[in-house]
Amino acid sequence: MIINRPLSPHLTIYKPQLTPTFSIFHRISGAFLATMVLFSIFYFKIGDPSLTFYHSYQYFFLLTFYLNWVITSLVNFTLLALCYHMSNGVRHLLWDSGLFLELSQVYTSGIIMLFCAAFSALLSLIRQLI
């Protein structure tokens, strides 16, 4: 039996909005940062006893020598995610205190939050190079 009624609206129908996009990326950056924390705990705590073997030393040397750009990119991406997550977290704390809740202020605070995240990430990268 075929029913000719309209389907429920999908994401492709709606125009992308700023606030849900920031919310989704806030959750993604939080999950990414949690994954990086778990990876670093595994790398430093569990992987530490295995460094007594020659092949582990060889593996870590090859990883850091030939794939240095991968590690540097991962660290920089983690830094960018951390700056974004912290800036958006401050924005959420301001919302919880009752500030910037009107629609125009929400969009303005979102754009300011992006600039603050990019500026703090850039500052940290410059500090890393010096």
Image (tube, rainbow, N blue to C red):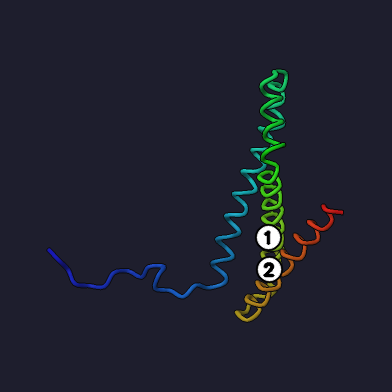
Residue 114's tag is 2
Query: In the picture provided, is 9 more to the left or to the right than 112?
Result: left
Residue 4 at x, y = what percent? 19, 72
Q: Which quadrant: the C terminus?
A: bottom right
Are dots 1 and 2 in contact, CB under 8 Å? Answer: yes
Q: Which quadrant: the N terminus?
A: bottom left
Query: In the picture provided, is 126 more to the left or to the right than 24?
Result: right
The residue singled out by tag 1 in the image is: 84
The amino acid beneath tag 2 is Leu
Circle 1: is it few (<14), some (14-19), or many (20+) Cα within 10 Å? many
Residue 87 at x, y = what percent? 71, 62
The amino acid beneath tag 1 is Tyr
What is the quadrant of residue 102 in the picture? bottom right
Circle 2: is it few (<14), some (14-19), or many (20+) Cα within 10 Å? some
Residue 35 at x, y = what percent? 61, 43
Foreground pick, 90 / 125:
125
Which residue is painted at 70% across and 42% down in the image? 68
Picture layout, residue 33 above or below residue 122: above
Residue 47's tag is none
Nearest to N terminus: mark 1 or mark 2: 1
